[in-house]
Image: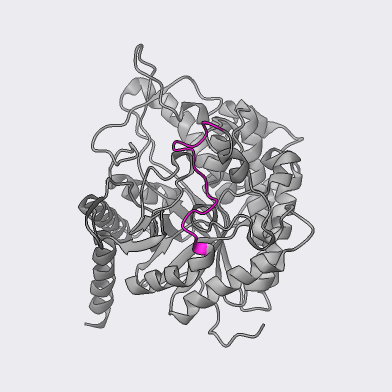
Amino acid sequence: MSHTTPPPARLPDGSRLELGTATASYQIEGGVADDGRGVSIWDTFAARPGTVRDGRDGTVACDSYHRYAEDADLVAGLGLDWYRFSIAWPRVLPEGSGRVETRGLDYYDRVVDALLERGVKPAATLYHWDLPQPLEDAGGWLARETPAAFADYAEVVYARLGDRVGLWATHNEPWCAAYLGYAAGVHAPGRREGGAAHRAAHHLMLGHAWASERLHSLGGSAGGCDVGIVLNLAPIRPGRSEAVELADQIDAVRNRVWLDPLAQGAYDDGLLRVAPELADPGLVRPGDLEAIHDSADWVGINYYTPVRPDVVVAGRPPHPERDAYPGTDPFDLVVPEPRTAIGWEIDATGLTDVLRETAARIDRPLLVMENGAACSDEVIAEGRVADDDRIIYLRDHLAAVDVARAEGVDVRGYVVWTLLDNFEWAEGYTKTFGLVHIDHTDQRRTPKASYAWLAGVVRERSSSLTE
């Protein structure tokens, strides 16, 4: 296939804050049985009774597999610089390795070309949690063979799309994949393995490093590429002095387990006290940390809310995420008001804080790759959806990024989660983050008030550059 497009867009230069929106394959595509796609761990997990709040799954989702051009029009209508999408590993390698399904690659060809034709730069994420089920059956991210298979998969995808896509993320939120999936069991694959989840964390980082090396080697003769990893980092804010040690333990599992090997090529002593599995030479083998060190050209940050640990108080119900921090002392999580519809504290200053803290820990350009809010949207008339609370949330968090940039933090992009109301993992379709309302009875797309607001922000910021 020949293309006459310009060289692939790479990491923004930082002269201005570039804006985008994001989606993820299992959450929007549907078409799970189309064109040879294999089974993912989310297909399997969602089929188990009681795992998803409304008992639904991503079989149809937003039907973007068939409506990708309509969705590309929606992105272009916002005037954004970037569209961040993810690639479904089971569409490309239905068994996880070996046989390549070219019809899956053809679909992502069409997505990329649709974006470029509309003047939107594509940013691809290789893994947004839809691991092929055959790899999970062989051990999943607890097995060292999975990061090796991930690097092979990355090579297959880059060979097809690398001439038009120059900005690549290996993993999205590996904390969720490792700790919600293998410790708390509330995300696919739904395993409760306790401290063994730290093994998954290491293998996810190893997969990132090996895939990054592979993409960089392939990009040398094809115009190059910038490869990063997207982490859901959070400021850890203990409410009282008794919780300071807890906060350090939680920071180790939430933030440092990813940033320290990237920045320093090591797991620190505080982390190893919480996660002694990471001191196992059978897991962390010679050369592993050296491969991870400096393997990211940029670091993506997904921010939604601070984490506020507290000592256990009798009679207070445990927070559902408590099991996602194996090895830490018993703790509770406090969630003050105001909150979004999903129950997360709203605090835009936390985004400024996490950008500052990350910049102090690793010398890499930063991209805010997800930020948004689940809101109780109101359909006030056909064709009109009011979501003023989302507008306020996005306004305040975009301002928080501007504060960090004004302080000298090298933040180069801000990406809104998400374009469409979609399958929101364990919440099913009960929580809506989208700029666009989806009527899941007929897949009709209705831009919300926040969509018009964001388009206006893009126009205002673009016009200010020409004045």
* Image quadrant in which the N terminus is located: bottom right
Figure quadrant of the C terminus: bottom left
Between 153 and 151, which is closer to the camera in this rendering?
Answer: 153
Q: Tell me which residue sits at (30%, 38%) in the image.
A: 345
Q: Residue at x 65, y 59 (%)?
A: 91
Residue 52: x %, y % from top left: 49, 37
Q: Is residue 165 visible?
A: no
Taking 411 as reference, is 75 above or below it?
below
| Residue at the outermost right position | 98
Outermost front residue: 441
Nearer the observer, 139 or 336: 139
Please name the colour scheme applied to the rendered image: one colour
Q: Please tell me in which quadrant of the rendered image residue 54 appears.
A: top left
Which secondary structure is most common in the magenta stretch? Answer: loop
In percent of width and height, residue 462 lies at 28, 76
Q: Report x, y in % for residue 188.
A: 58, 39
Q: Is residue 185 visible?
A: yes
Q: Quadrant of residue 408?
A: bottom left
Callout count: 0
Side of 188 relative to 71 (left or right): right
Task: Please say whether residue 444 is one of the residues in the magenta stretch.
Answer: no
Who's the residue at 58% across and 30% down the image? Answer: 183
Residue 54 among those drawn in magenta: yes
In the image, the segment drawn in magenta is 49-64
> Is residue 277 depicted above or below 287 in this figure?
above
Q: Residue 352 at x, y = what percent?
A: 32, 50
Q: Which residue is found at the position 39% from the left and 17% from the top? A: 312
Question: Which residue, as the protein is rendered here, is positioned at the far top?
Answer: 314
